[in-house]
Amino acid sequence: MRKIYLSLFLPFFFAGCGGGGSSTAQETLSWYTPPLDTLWHYQLTGDINTSLDANLYDIDLEDTNETTIKLLHHQGKKVICYLSAGTAESWRSDYSAFQSSDMGKSVVDWDGERWLDIRSQNVKNIMLSRLENAREKGCDGVETDNVDGYANDTGFYLSNEDQLSYNRFLAQEAHKRGLCIGLKNDLSQIEALVDDFDFAVNEQCFSQNECNLLTPFIKDGKPVFNVEYQSSYLQSDAMAQLCNEAKDFHFATIIEPLSLDGSFSYNCQEYLFQTYGVGFGGADAFKFYDNIYVNVYDIINDTYSDYEKGVQDFNATAFSQLSSYLSNTKFVVFWITKEWQESWFDIASLQKLIDEGKTPVFLYWYFGDNLQFDGYLQENKAAYFEDVVRVGNFLHQFHGDKFLILEPEFNKNNILDDVNESALFVSIMGEAIDTLKKIDTRTYISLSMMDTGSRTTQSDLGKCGYSFCALGDMYEWSRVESIYKPLLDKLDFISFNEMVSQFSRDPSNPGDWDHPNPIAYTDDAIGIDYLPQRIDNFGAFLEQTYHKPVFLPYMAIATATWDDTDGDNVVDENEINATGWELKAQQVYSNINTKHIFGYSVMELFDNPAHDDGGYQFFMQNEYHLGVVKAPSVEKQLSGAIQMKQNIIPTIFTKE
């Protein structure tokens, strides 16, 4: 039997357990302690699917061979082995070892299964043999099912003390063998047993409204592994509600079929990564005419009445059409720069977006381009750590899930090539992530690398790893392994960003602020026609290298082009075609393959006529054309005469 309540069986998935016993005899023993955020998979029947991203597998002790366990270990996963400690199952190889006096009544709804007299020494001896088998097979821990016989009609008079004694016996004997062990479904004895067990296993506590009974494990820093079986949870809205509740409890919750055959598995810890979505960025509010700021919430929800009189040339029809598409957005992206202030953000409206199912993505660009200067990290790390706490406290105000992308575009040459700078960066990011996760457990953290490297359609002579470099540059992409690998256990997902323009400053000779040296690229040199395939290849490369979900937090295709007609190597205004690459951008967004990424966001919703204020602009005048919506400028502000660029907005945001 797997589970008594509602005739369901309990899936327990855990990856190696506990951190030491309490008695003197166990002081020298040790066993794995599972983190609260462990990803797990529970499968007791069928061929084990060993390809999942789960860190822990809970599988049947007897039906699983050592080869499968070794394979899972080779993949870096932990293995929990299921056994029933409170019932005799007629299909088990040691069934005949039970004496007739050991077996009581049949278990309701489970043919061939009978309750055991847990006071019997023979029963205990059989369980010791099973624990020894688990140790010999290489299991990291055990799931001992049906350890609540005292609360069921077993045919024996089992007292509360009988059950406590037996359950502690199991825990002590598991620990003696270096195995972790979980308490399963014995809800009324949790307070008494939480110190003896390494984690809890529960079936359907949300369906049965009993999750509050399991919180002592969380308070003690031990995970609760919960499984839900109701098919209604497979509906997106119901799944979102369940997963939000599970995250509030800090439970590791999965949705599985009652057969536990591996046919499907949804993990609430990865819910955000399992449902594809798109988004947009720019600002919490966009500055329109005469210092009127149009809030992101109002843009998404078509609530413009407060702006119509203040925004010059306000086109209510165009704004409402835009809102109809943006209502489908999943992500809304904001930048947090070094000088950020909380006053930049409307806390109430952001919370309303979260409540409506949107996920805010914060790009924390503290070091930014200064990463390229040796010594900058060391000189500014103390101030950075102070700001990290400020960011964490800011995010903690919001109830719900948030993404935080640390140091987008971190892959500067000195960070990747200088061993000391690389080690320092990893150390600083690791400490920052630990700090942020202690402050807020609903913040999911990543690093985002810039897609650098060659993009030409010419043959790469094997350097890029593809037939030509427009399809990707594996050599360049691999350089970040020294950063990602040591931080991998701390990162919730991996990110990369794309920024492409037909003209920019010349990377090899950029010039200074007043005298930039521009460069214009041919379509073949920049590989614009192959960008959708490059994105797909990059996502696949990161997914296969790091075995983490992959996200594209911002993507920009500058839509202007430049033709140096007078040959003076200066980008004159009359040489710029503001719509030259609009069709190219439309073609890219139309052909993005989402197989290897769980979502992406466009960098700018609106063209930004003030994008060059106060900083170095790599794309020069094309910085004004990074948006997917045209917004004619009025003295470096936006006007209300917005207009779609080609069919880009409907392409991105219309649900199929």
Image (cartoon, rainbow, N blue to C red):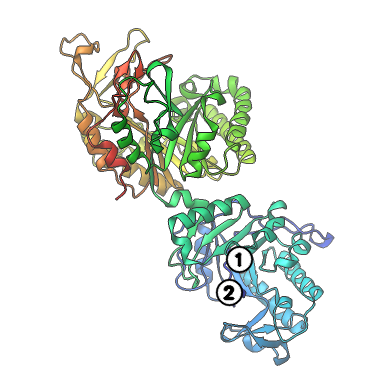
Distance from disc 1 to disc 2, alpha carbons, whole Å, reads 9 Å
Q: Residue at x 63, y 68 (%)?
A: 143
Circles 1 and 2, Cβ within 8 Å, touching? The answer is yes
Above or below, comparing residue 374 to residue 188 in the picture: above
Residue 366 shown left or right of residue 649 in the figure: right
Image position, residue 527 (x, y; %): 24, 33
Q: Residue at x 42, y 33 (%)?
A: 298
Q: Can residue 471 be seen?
A: no
Question: On the image, numbered disc 1 is attached to which residue?
Answer: 208
Q: Is residue 636 left or right of residue 447?
A: left
> Which element type, helix, strand or loop, lies under badge 2?
helix
- For mark 2, what is the residue? 6
Place of residue 415 in the rendered image (x, y in percent of width and height, measured from the top left): 48, 28
The kind of secondary structure element at disc 1 is loop
Report the residue at 21% width, 36% height from top.
Answer: 529
Quadrant of the image occupied by residue 570: top left
Query: Can you tell which mark lies on residue 165?
Result: none
Observer-nearest of 367 and 281: 281
Q: What percent of the width, then of the height, locates residue 343? A: 55, 24
